Amino acid sequence: MLYHNFPKVRQMAAEKLYTGMLTKDSYEDLMPGGEEAYEQFDALISETDWNSDLKKLTADTKDKMYGFFGHEVKQK
């Protein structure tokens, strides 16, 4: 949902993901990079303007965001 067409949906998804991650005691089960990956994720999700242009947002953050969780972006 972070890359949905509607900015309000992206903003809400980012807020919910951020809040959900704050409740975790350990990040190892969600993020292969553990604590270091979480710190980078935290900076990216907090500093990103989720209301910005979707094409720019996708180009700037999507690969990184998927990588934090051990996934690759599907190529169209």
Image: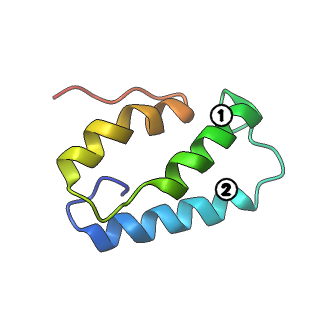
On the image, the x and y values in percent for residue 73 come to: 34, 30
Question: Disc number at residue 21?
Answer: 2
Closer to us: 35 or 48: 48
Q: CA distance from mark 2 to mark 1?
A: 12 Å
Asked whether the viewer can see residue 30, the reply is: no
Quick check: 54 above or below 75?
A: below
Residue 30 in the image: x percent, y percent? 66, 39
Q: Describe the element under mark 2 as helix, strand or loop.
A: helix
Cβ–Cβ under 8 Å for marks 2 and 1: no
**Which quadrant of the figure has residue 75?**
top left
Q: Residue drawn 38% across and 60% down? A: 49
User: In the rendering, which numbered label is found on residue 22?
Assistant: none
Taking the spot 33% from the left edge, 38% from the top edge, the residue there is: 60
Is residue 33 visible to us here?
A: yes
Q: Amino acid at mark 2?
A: Met
Q: Foreground: 53 or 32? A: 53
State whether residue 57 is above or below residue 8. Answer: above
- What residue lies at 28% left-to-right and 29% top-to-bottom? 74
For the N terminus, the quadrant is bottom left
Q: Given the image, on which type of amino acid does mark 1 rest?
A: Ala
The residue where tag 1 is placed is: 37
Q: Position of residue 35 (x, y in %)?
A: 76, 36
**Label 2 neighbourhood size at 10 Å, few (<14), some (14-19), many (20+)?**
some
- Indicate the quadrant where residue 53 lies: bottom left
Whichever of labels 2 and 1 marks the residue nearer the N terminus, that label is 2
Q: Residue at x 55, y 34 (%)?
A: 68
